[in-house]
Amino acid sequence: MSPPGHSRRRRANLPLLFLVPVLMFGFGYLMVPIYNAFCDLTGLNGKTGTLSVTEAAKLEADEDRLVKVEFTGSLNQYAPWEFAPREASMMVHPGRQYKTSYVATNRLDRSLVGQAVPSVSPGRAATHFNKTECFCFVQQEFGPGETRDMPVVFIVDPALPRNVDTVTLSYTFFNVTEQAVN
Amino acid sequence: MNAATTDTHHDDHHDHGPAPGLMRWVTTTNHKDIGTLYLWFSLIMFFIGGAMALVIRTELFQPGLQVVDPQFFNTMTTMHALVMIFGVIMPAFVGLANWMVPIMVGAPDMALPRMNNWSFWILPFGFAMMLSTLFMEGGGPAAGWTLYPPLSLQGGSGFPFLIFSIHILGISSIMGAINIVATIMNLRAPGMTFMKMPLFVWTWFITAYLLIAVMPVLAGAVTMLLTDKYFGTAFFTAGGGGDPVMFQHIFWFFGHPEVYILILPSFGVVSEIIPTFSRKRLFGYSSMVYATASIAFLSFIVWAHHMFTVGMPVSGALFFMFATMLIAVPTGVKVFNWVATMWRGAMTFETPMLYALGFVIMFTIGGFSGVMLALVPVDFQYHDTYFVVAHFHYVLVPGSIFAIIGAVYYWLPKWTGKMYDEKWGKIHFWTSTFFVNLLFFPMHFVGLAGMPRRIPDYAVQFADFNAIATIGAFGFGFSQLIFVYVVVKCIRGGEKATDQVWEGAEGLEWTLSSPPPYHSFTEQPVVK
């Protein structure tokens, strides 16, 4: 199809044209880790900080400052539990480790598997809120009618912005029995 | 499909004519045949999608639930959108591109004719699959065309059929787009430099790149939905550590370029029609090209304005708000260029020109409501109301659809070799314009007053405007039968059209005979 006198014109590179859709399909999937990294970095979506236990032990407690930490718990659709924090709120010193717990009761007479998903607001406080131990790290199995306390150990980074005096930790409890069986 | 009517369409070709019979349409690799198939296909889908819209408007004629149950209502809003976007506007523009791009750049055919055949013929199968979900257990998709999880994952057994049909439609449009890019880059006539290409070719060139870039992203997003539902992945399932909001980001990263895929070729059509009937050259040709390119670029960085209410930080909302408002600048350049083209032109008002003028005025109304929706503080009020419905229907119906109809009237004498009935064309324009405004303008008012979209019932204070909109919907729907009448009448016979057809028309397509020979430009034209 090459007409005379056309050799120097820019021509469509067909393999490249077919490669672009394949790469863009991959890019769609690449957006998942990009999104997660972006949320981790900025604390958007309430993604919490990632201090390890040893790192947390090195933090110096700020005895002059008190921050209020509120706890909420909610259930997703089709999650037949009762689920609530033991304490509605605590006054904490940044840099010191605290422990609290949530309590959940299976309302059915068969075994269920639940998974809690945490979120911290406001977003700019989220990266400074670290959980060193949390029931949200693993799936929770409940026997029929079982009630159980589930502990959370957390530490607020002293680098928490000065203008934040209340941090809310919220858990949503999901029923993942079907996925867990599979 | 309509073989009886389309067959007569090409009967008067003299040499190198196609083989007769139905198999001609199945095996054809001819760009005109495939363009014709695309256009008939989208016309049929236009009436299917329109019937769905009339179900919606019938239910909304009065407050309360009277005609359909809410689940089916939601199915109708979802399917109406999918059919109109993927089955009407996109195939119609690809059909126009198939017909016109080769003869506008002086090529004998499309660059990849066999792939062209395939990219059309998988479409009817994709849509058969999509429409078949209506008869399946659990009904068709009812979570809106945006398919937001978790709602979209709660549908019936039709869900995987919907996903696979979206894959097929995506593959079809990607192949169509690759073909158009290859044709434009490789088969231009000597002397036809990039900056001498007609604007319809330019806008399609840019649209094709948008398609190649974003349709695969949609395919990826719906594949993730599929694996979330059936294979235990947790991309969007919060219980497994996924995030439903992430779907909205991925979807709209496709979705916003997609809305420009639906409008950029109309800019091209209008930029062809207005100079012809103003008997002047297009004002600001190069600024039109650059404006199209900048709209295409900006479309990649504004997606989150569809989701201001998900709770994004102020800095993010501000960025997306300003980037969105920036799009008004190149769009404004285009509108002013069209107006400047008409300025002191020797204008006449044949049907294509009426449609182009209707486009410029009514698309601009939709553009203005778009700027209103771009403003974060007020968007919180407008979000998910009928104001949004009014906005995107103004840019898509008197925008894209009017441009497509205008293009058909403009090039129909070239395609068939006969003039269409001007009187009935004008009647079609005026009834369409009257009823389309009766249909969509009241939606601005009920939307501002707080009527939510995608809900089959509404508060009684919205009753009057909804009744008016429903009357407009039926009027607009039945007006389109006039269009079918005019097109069929023109194919069957009519006054012989000249090669140039329109007095002020310029471009390679008007140097060919009307109708053009089966193989366009067997000898390459030279553009000076």
Image (tube, rainbow, N blue to C red):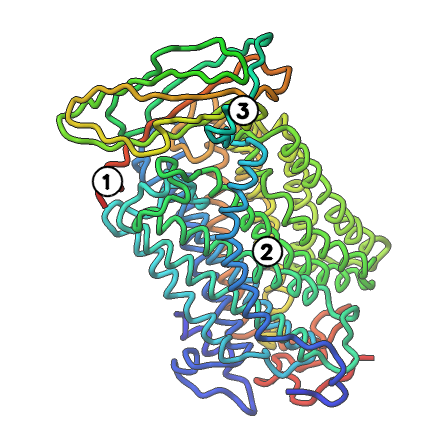
Res. B261 mark: 2
Which structural element holds mark 1?
A: helix
Q: CA distance from mark 3 to mark 1?
A: 41 Å
**Circle nearer the viewer, 3 or 1:** 3
| Vertical placement of residue B203 versus B230, above or below | below
Q: CA distance from mark 2 to mark 3?
A: 55 Å
Q: CA distance from mark 1 to mark 2?
A: 41 Å
Asked if residue B291 lies left or right of residue A24, the reply is right
- Mark 1 or mark 3, which is nearer the start of the sequence? 3
Res. B114 mark: none
Which structural element holds mark 3?
A: helix
Residue labelled with disc 1: A178
x and y percent of residue A180 in the render? 25, 40
Asked if residue B319 lies left or right of residue B178, the reply is right
The amino acid sitting under disc 2 is Ile
The amino acid sitting under disc 1 is Glu
- To which chain does the residue with label 1 belong? A
**Circle nearer the viewer, 1 or 2:** 1
Neighbourhood count class around disc 1 (C-alpha, 10 Å): few under 14, some 14–19, many 20 upward = few
| Vertical placement of residue A64 versus B496, above or below | above
Residue labelled with disc 3: A58
The amino acid sitting under disc 3 is Lys
Neighbourhood count class around disc 2 (C-alpha, 10 Å): few under 14, some 14–19, many 20 upward = many
Q: Are marks 3 and 1 on the same chain?
A: yes
Asked if residue B119 lies left or right of residue A151, the reply is right
Residue A39 versus residue B190: which sits nearer the camera?
A39
x and y percent of residue B450 in the render? 51, 25
**Circle nearer the viewer, 2 or 3:** 3
Residue at the image point whose x is 50% and y is 32% from the top: A50
Q: Examine the rendering and report whether any part of residue B503 can be seen.
A: no
Q: Are marks 2 and 3 on the same chain?
A: no
